[in-house]
Image (cartoon, rainbow, N blue to C red):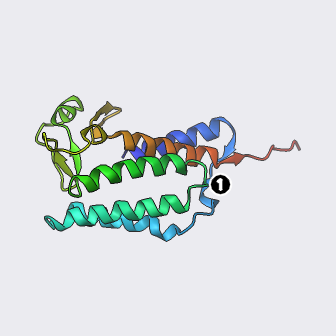
């Protein structure tokens, strides 16, 4: 859901600065088809009720996302997306294919402390790199969730991808 908010904010900012917001769709992404694989794998991992296999699917999804990001590094916004995705990938791989989630963060985000999905694992004393997990509570505009430092980089990169790759709209000529 946050991705929609970020994209809408970038489109609104582009329109305020009189930019053509359709230009990012014409950006020449390398291996564009690869961007869909991580999302499909994540959906299967979350909704497939696959147990431990879900952890492997999540890990594979993030590695594919990193490959796509590196291939598109030169596109404005992608350095931020790549750094964020790499940060999330590292912490997920080091914690068995699941993102560590702080119970305190859940409560601060306005969620029940026992909220859990197959992509996450509650932080314990054995969590590796806990500060890179989902430790930032979001309780804003009806959104209640936890995010990581890597997520903030991804959100920034998405905003910049849309906004910076939008071109100035051609000036309208008078009649």
Residue 146, percent across and down?
27, 39
Residue 131, percent across and down?
28, 37
The residue positioned 18% from the left and 44% from the top of the image is 127
Q: Is residue 60 left or right of residue 156?
A: left
The residue under label 1 is 23
The residue positioned 59% from the left and 37% from the top of the image is 13
The residue positioned 24% from the left and 66% from the top of the image is 56
**The C terminus lies in which quarter of the figure?**
top right
Answer above or below: position of 30 versus 2: below
Q: Is residue 77 left or right of residue 102?
A: right
Residue 81, percent across and down?
48, 49
- Quick one: SS at disc 1? helix
The residue positioned 27% from the left and 41% from the top of the image is 134
Point out the residue furthest to the left here.
114
Answer above or below: position of 138 versus 154: above
Point out the residue furthest to the right here.
175
User: On the image, which quarter does residue 128 sit in?
Assistant: top left
Residue 2, percent across and down?
38, 43
Instruction: State how many labels appear.
Output: 1
Point out the residue furthest to the top here.
108
User: On the image, which quarter does residue 89 sit in?
Assistant: bottom left
Disc 1: CA contacts within 10 A as few (<14), some (14-19) or many (>=20): some
Residue 166 vs residue 100, the one in the foreground: 100
């Amino acid at each position: 859901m946050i991705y929609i908010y970020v994209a809408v904010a970038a489109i609104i900012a582009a329109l305020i600065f009189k930019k053509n917001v359709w230009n990012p769709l014409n950006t020449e992404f390398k291996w564009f088809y690869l961007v869909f694989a991580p999302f499909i794998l994540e959906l299967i991992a979350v909704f497939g009720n696959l147990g431990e296999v879900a952890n492997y699917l999540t890990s594979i999804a993030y590695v594919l996302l990193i490959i796509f990001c590196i291939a598109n590094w030169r596109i404005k916004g992608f350095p931020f997306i790549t750094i964020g995705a790499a940060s999330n990938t590292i912490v997920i791989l080091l914690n068995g294919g699941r993102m560590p989630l702080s119970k305190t963060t859940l409560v601060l985000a306005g969620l029940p402390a026992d909220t859990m999905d197959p992509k996450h694992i509650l932080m314990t004393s054995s969590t590796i790199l806990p500060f890179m997990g989902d430790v930032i509570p979001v309780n804003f505009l009806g959104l209640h969730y936890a995010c990581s430092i890597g997520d903030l980089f991804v959100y920034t990169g998405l905003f910049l991808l849309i906004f910076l790759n939008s071109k100035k709209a051609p000036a309208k000529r008078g009649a």
